[in-house]
Image (tube, grey):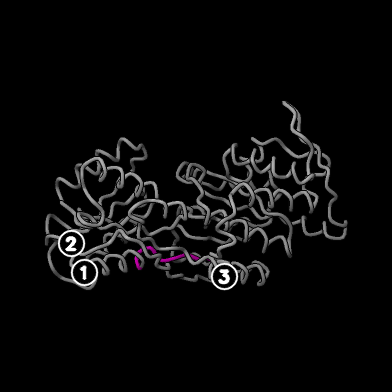
Amino acid sequence: MGEGIERRTIASQLAESIYREIEIGTWVDRIPGKRTLAKRFGVNIKTCASALELLERRGCIGKGQAGRERAILMRRKPAGRKAKSSRTLLILHQADAALNLEDVQLFRKMGEIWSKSHGNALWVGVDYPRYRRPGPFLDKLIQRHSASAIMLHMCWRNWCPEALKRVPTYQAGGARENEIEGSFGASRLSDDSLRAIKHLRQIGHRRILMPSLTFDEPLWRTLCASFSIDWDERPPVGTWEDYCPRFVETHPDGWEVIWRRSFASLKPTAVVLRDDSLLLSLYSYCFANGLRIPRDLSVILLDHDKLLEYLRPRPTMMRYPIKAALAHFQAWVDNDLRPIGRKNFELEWVGGDSVAPPRHG
């Protein structure tokens, strides 16, 4: 990610997205309220309020008044460009998962690619695990937003087949049925997990814990397989599945209990994580229990968020290759939304200070 982009706040990026929506004629005289906009773009209300204040200072919209929508003051682009708005892309993402800066950048850039040749892109948060049969819900979304295509971000495996039955669909990350023909760009979690585990084993770690926050049984089995590839030795304690425990706990207090049990039974010297929330939870547990990173415990996160670099020690992370992902998405758009197959991306290492050889075996 370029230095200029990293320094920009989510609010400023959201302000640009709202500005472009006004340009292409999504709103003409007045702009929706901050709650409506926050839900549409998948951000919190405070961020949305900051974006509106930025647009107000630029003279694009009028001052806010309680209970009233803000007036649009800026001029729209010439009418000849409005033809693009006839096709809408829905960018669907998990509703209760906080979007980090790189998620926001990915969605914003995909929206820009789409708007150059088609129309506007809308961000919509949905609860993937709530819908075992997502078809009827997708029908409502498509009808409500007059959607011509869908981009699914980190979706469950039952969503893409249903979306493909209805409109052209691109899937970015998440689980996927192998037999589904479509357009899919993602890093392969099993490969990235194996790279992290191999790196830790090369410097002497054997007790490597990789907890999985997932309901998906096939995905969990794939992660467990990362522990048994390329070596035949027995695990230090129990089975390899014990080192890849699957939890569905989402409350912070619950994870304190999980860490305590895992450390008591397995005594790990290293932990590989997929979720930044679990990284924060682990750092807190280590601080509260006198464990020093990386002296007592090495940590690798299979994700990246610029804000996490403020932690000390700075976590060793693996970053999603946004440029490569956008190039694949561009190829799908250029191919008139016809299927272009699967593209696997390798995560990029982001150096940190949270990995060291174990002090004990």
The numbered dot on residue 328 is 3
Residue sitting at 36 percent across and 49 percent down?
Answer: 214
Q: Residue 145 versus residue 4: which sits nearer the camera?
A: 4
Quadrant of res 261: top left
**Where in the figure is residue 181, as x and y percent of width and height?**
52, 67
Frontmost of labels 2 and 3 is 2
Taking the magenta stretch, the answer to whether it contains residue 18 is no
Q: Earlier in the sequence, mark 2 or mark 1?
A: 1
Q: Is residue 63 left or right of residue 161?
A: right
Marks 2 and 1 close (CB-CB < 8 Å): yes
Name the amino acid type tagged 2: Pro
Q: Residue at x 71, y 54 (%)?
A: 120
The residue indicated by pointer 1 is: 203
Give the numbered dot on residue 276.
Answer: none
Q: What residue is rendered at 39% in x and 67% in y?
A: 349
Nearer to us in this view, 222 or 330: 330
Of circles 3 and 1, the one toward us is: 1
User: What residue range appears in magenta?
Assistant: 184-191
Q: Which mark is residue 358?
A: 2
